[in-house]
Image: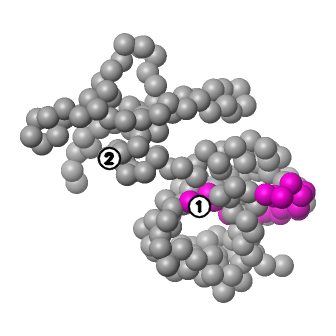
Amino acid sequence: MDTALFSAASLFHGDDSDDDRDEMQVDAEGQKHALEYVERDHDFPGMKLCVREFSCHELNANLLWPGTFSFATWLVKNQSILEGQRILELGRPDWDIVIASDILLYVKQYENLVKTLSFLLKEYKQNVQKTGCVTITDKSGTQIPAKTPMFLMSWRRRIGKDQSLFFTGCETAGMEVQHVGDLVYLISIRK
């Protein structure tokens, strides 16, 4: 495996205002090129995060994960969906909600992702302390019920003619796909 040529930590603004290590990039011929980025402040409950979004960067040739902030904004507006829930982390056996970005679709393993998601949702074990459902606000502003287990994801990548394969695969496998917010999808077992 190749060693990373840069640290993902460099995407976040340092405490030192003189920190200019991301201002220039040296190519193979030794020529320096300025890295172009936009710093954006994102407000989350209890914190403000300044993220550098690069227009051309080693991690992504587009603005860095453009759907992520729409997804984060949607989650902040719908915090009740997370309160008291167990969120799936890799390696963690108990959960109520799976949250992911569209990076999962970028690898074009739609069939495997659908199988994995179907397995997770069907094998879900209800948390006896938390039952019932919560309401979330969909993209039209309507309150709709959302019941665990569920899969939430943001999706914005352009993956050509294959872009609907994942969502169609979910529906074929017995899942319901709802477009609940700007670039935000909720997938659950069909009732």
Front-most of residues 143 and 123:
143
Q: Would residue 176 be visible to someone looking at this image? A: yes
95 displayed left or right of 109: right
The quarter of the picture where the C terminus appears is: bottom right
Across and down, in percent, residue 24 comes to: 26, 29
Q: Residue at x 46, y 16 (%)?
A: 15
- The residue drawn where x is 71% and y is 78% is 175
Name the residue: 83% across, 63% down. Answer: 147
Q: Which amino acid type is shown beneath numbered disc 2?
A: Glu
| Residue closest to the eye, 96 or 82 | 82
Q: How many labels does the image show?
A: 2
Q: Is residue 117 left or right of residue 5?
A: right
Q: Decide if residue 88 is on the left or right side of residue 191.
A: left
Q: Which mark is residue 155?
A: 1
Residue 42 percent across, percent down from the top left? 62, 33
| Drawn side of residue 124 relative to residue 147, left or right | left
* Label 1 crowd bin: few (<14), some (14–19), many (20+), radius 10 Å: many
In the image as oriented, which residue stretches furthest toward the left? 29
Quarter of the image with the N terminus is bottom left
**Which labelled disc corresponds to residue 58?**
2
The secondary element bearing badge 1 is classed as loop
Position of residue 142 measured from the top left corner of the image (x, y, whole percent)? 89, 58
Amino acid beneath label 1:
Trp
Whole-angstrom CA distance, mark 2 to mark 1, is: 21 Å
| Chain part drawn in magenta | 138-156
Q: Does the magenta stretch include residue 153?
A: yes
Give the x, y percent position of residue 145.
88, 62
